[in-house]
Every structure is written in structure tokens, then in C-alpha cells.
Image: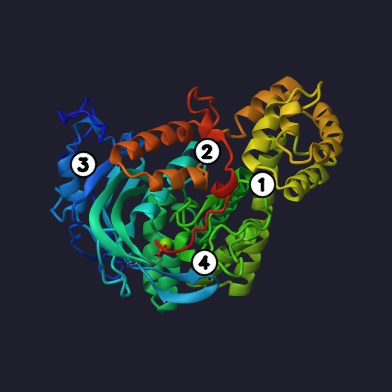
Amino acid sequence: MTISSPGSAAEGLSRLESLPLVHGYAGLGEEFSTEVFPRELRGAELLHLNRAGCALLDLDPDSVDPQQAVDWFAGGRQMPGARPVAAVYSGHQFGVWAGQLGDGRALLFGEIRNHRGETWDVQVKGSGPTPYSRGGDGRAVWRSTLREYLGGEALAGLGIPTTRALALFTSEEPVYREEVERGALLVRLARCHVRLGTFEHFHWTRRQDLVRVLFGYSLGRWYPHLLGLSARAGAFLDEVTDRTASMVAQWMAVGFCHGVMNTDNFSILGETLDYGPYAFMDDFVWDHICNCSDHEGRYAFSKQPEVGLWNLLRFAEALQSLFPDTAVEALMEHVNARYGEAFEVSYKGLMAGKLGVEVGAAGFDSLLDSTLDLLGRTKTDYTCFWRELSQCDLASTPDRLRARFAQPTDLDAWWPAYRAFRSDHPIGGSVGESGRQMLATNPRYVARNYLLQEIIAEETSAGRCQRIEDLLEVLRDPYGEHPGLEALAEPPRGAQKALSIGCSS
Ligand code: AMP
Ligand code: MG
């Protein structure tokens, strides 16, 4: 632990014991969630407290007593003001209806409204069995907990809507997966834990009355601007569609592969939720499958846009009782068209920004196609390519960019057309300005799997903490330079490329 000793909270900030938790979701009643007391995680230790997460809760990080944090989040002691509940939901997993799922290893302690008026769920993941554990142990292992802790902060740094993290705990408790591992625990923060699968749950258990209750709650909390509309169900479906399309487009632009795009892992707020075997693209492979448990490649990188739509179609089905005068086929057709357009606008705008060119210019589509084709054929590192491109002087030979290619002549064949296009249609009105904008669009640092793996393999707490701090520093500002931490921008080499990550967590 690298946190200074606890004291009184700074002006305007709370201490852990006085966090003003409220219980809106728990208040919906036992059809939505079940009260469960967290089970002690043996030998738990607070490994890392995320100061950015504290800020979201108006919590003073310097006032946090590590032992108190252990007692309340991992020690099975009652936290003042908390009312832990496990929520029920269902979902489609890998394209198949999975029936009832629910929080099998997570408990919502309550919600906090911060001084900016945002409400954040405080959820503890890895807290022991619940009525929804389906035979599982209710635990989470160190490697997956660390990956989720840093994954959320990485996407947040890139400006992509996501769940966040407050604290990371390790433990002495053995947890049995393919082999014996150590249990860990994550305190997750999310503006929304209602999943597409939460609506599916009530629809497919024929509780349309509860679909309506959940709809009312969702509007009040996340979509209050729709409350006054007569066509609010349609506006809700539209907004969830737009937000999801935008989120997936942003994933594609930064080369993020989610890995488990089941409907229970998609929130109704269009935020990245449930980090499993995700990956940021290293060498660009359009059909990259980051989850080695995904044998069919259902969630391959290239499939993400269409899976986002598929999930929304299941959501539209689940909402059909809110549209008594509309056939479900028409509802789905509407979502189909709306998503297609929202995704295209969002994606092309982002890719134009990466290329540094105006999106509307004739010939843009073929420039984008030829760029992705170049990267795919040459398996060039995705992040390094865009970053180097941002730094190229169009007037001279792009030597540093050429050095990123195994066969620089592949780049040479593409370069003249790109240079001409950007010279004619630079974003921001000039080539110089387009370069500046590209540097604020194309990150230097992403949470590469090999970097996460190095922290996971670190034996000592001190070593882990320092590596986490370093990685958080660059991930929070992935467009900056960060002298001394340049190595964290390096692509993987040799065995670092061959990591295999599956669903086990
Ligand atoms: P996830 O892969 O974490 O999104 O989990 C999918 C579903 O399985 C959710 O309902 C989880 O709560 C549940 N689950 C995953 N792992 C466990 C576990 N070790 N014990 C109980 N439930 C689990
Ligand atoms: Mg999940």
C-alpha cells in the first residue's frame, strides 16, 4: 500500500464510513435483487486504491484506512450505510439463450450521487456466493480482477464510456479454476449495472409488469430527459441503440476487442461492462479472436459491429410489451436501420480523425479500406502505426513509420495516395493542424495484454503496486509522452505475443 496515513477527510470529501450510500435499485424489491451478506475473503489485503475512482465518489483517498477497507469490502463486516444486494438478470451468451444468470459473485453495496450530480453504483466483485451463483464459488481470481481494474481505467483514459474501479484486493484464499489460484476482489464503480439481459429476464419470464417497472426506473435514473415525452419507449430504445453503436465504433477505432459480447455484458447506458479476456490489438488482424474460449470466433474483432446490433435486436424483443401498437418485426427493422446509420457515422468520423482527413471528402471510403487492408496484410502493430502516422512530416520520407513494417515497400505503395489525400483534405484546415489533432486522437499507450501479464506474474506486492502505478499513469493520459515510461508504449515481441486468454476468471 502506498497511501498516506488516514486522517480526517479533506474539505467537501467523504470518509469511507460516511459515504452517503443510497439504495435505489435495492428499493425496487425482491423481484429485482436479493439481499446477501458478503463472505470474508481470507487474508485479504488492499493492494491498490484508485485515486481517480475515489474522485468519482467524492471520497478522500488519504482518509481511507486500509484495514477498514479490507473489513468492509472483503472482510465480511457490515459497512456503515451499505445494503448489499445481488441483482437478477438473464441473457444470450454466445448467441444462445442462457436463461437466468444474475450477480453470481458480485454485490451492489449502494449508489452515491457525487457533487457533479452523477450517480455511481458501488459494487463488490468476488464477494462470495449468491442465490445466482449456479454452483460457482462466487469468487474472482487475481489475474482477471487485475485485468478488469486496469481495463476500465484504460478505456476511460481513451474517453470511451466504461465502468470504473475504486479498489483492488488480493488474498490468501485459494480459488479453484484449471489450477489453484488466489482469490481477489474488485470494487467496481458503474453509472449503470442494468444490462440488456435485465430487460430480457423480465420479458422472457413473462413479467411484463416488471419490464414496465424497470423501464420507469431506468428513465428516472439514466434518461430523465425522456420522461416528458409521449413516445418515451421509442426514444429510450433509440438512445440505447445510438449509445451502443457509438461505444462499439469507439472500440473499433482504438482496436479494442471485448471478447465476451453477451447481452448480459451490455449495459443499457452503452458503457463497456465486464472485462474478461479483452485485448487491445497488437499486430492488426481483422478477424482477431481475443478469447480462446470463443471457438467459432463469434466475437472476433471484425464481428463486433454486427454483434452490437444483434444484441440490440434481442433488447428490442425484450421491450416489445412497451410497444403494444407495433409489431416486433417493425421494431427490429427500425433498430436495424438506426444502428446501421449511427454506427457508420460514428465509425467513419473516428477513422477520419485517425487518418487526419475530412470525413466527407470523395474517396475517403477507399482510403480507409486501403489503410486497413495494408495493416491486415502486413500485420503491423495497430497502435504504433497510427501514432507514427500522426508524427509524419508529409513533405519527407516517413522513415520511422517505414521502420514499423516488416517490408517497408508495402507502406511505400500506400503512402503517395495517403499523402495526396491528406494534403488536399486535412482535418482542421491545414496539414499542420491535422497532425496536432491526430496526436490527440491516436493514443501512444494502450493496456496491452503482455503488460497486464507482467503485472499478473509479479511476485511481490511492492513490485505489483509500482507497475500498476506506472501503467495507470500512462493509461490515464494515453496521448501524452510520459518521459521514463516510454517502454510501456512498446509492442510485444516474441513470446509476449503468444498469450492465450479465455473465459475462466
Ligand atoms: P462473467 O463472465 O463474469 O460475465 O459471468 C457470467 C455469469 O456467470 C454471471 O452471472 C456471473 O455472476 C456468473 N459467474 C461467473 N463466475 C462465477 C463464479 N466463480 N461464481 C459464481 N458465479 C459466477
Ligand atoms: Mg458478465
- Pick the residue in front: 296 or 195: 296
Q: Alpha-carbon distance for marks 3 and 4?
A: 40 Å
Residue type, label 4: Ser
**Alpha carbon distance from label 1 to label 2:** 15 Å
Disc assigned to residue 229 = none
- Residue 143, can we see it? yes
Residue, x 72% and y 33% (percent of image)?
403
Can you tell which quarter of the image residue 197 is in?
bottom left
Q: Secondary structure at mark 1?
A: helix
**Mark 4 packing: few (<14 Cα in 10 Å), some, or many (20+)?**
some
Q: Are marks 1 and 2 in contact (CB under 8 Å)?
A: no
Find the distance from the CA under tag 1 to the CA under tag 3.
39 Å
Secondary element under disc 2, as helix, strand or loop, is loop
Of badges 1 and 2, nearer the viewer stands: 2
Per the rendering, the mark at residue 158 is 2
Please name the amino acid that badge 1 sits on: Tyr
Q: Residues within 10 Å of mark 1 (few under 14, many from 20)?
A: many
First in sequence: mark 2 or mark 3?
Answer: 3
Mark 2 and mark 4: Cα distance apart in space: 27 Å
User: Is disc 4 placed on a helix, strand or loop?
Assistant: loop
Tell me the number on the disc at residue 19: 3
Type of amino acid at the residue the image marks with label 2: Leu
Q: Which residue is mark 1?
A: 347
Q: In terms of sequence position, does the residue under pointer 2 or pointer 4 come before the other?
A: 2
Give the label, 2 or 4, closer to the camera. 4
Tag 2 near tag 3, CB within 8 Å: no
Type of amino acid at the residue the image marks with label 3: Leu
Q: Is the shortest distance between ligand 2 and the CB of mark 2 under 8 Å?
A: no
Which of the two labelled residues, at mark 3 and mark 4, occupies the earlier sequence position?
Answer: 3
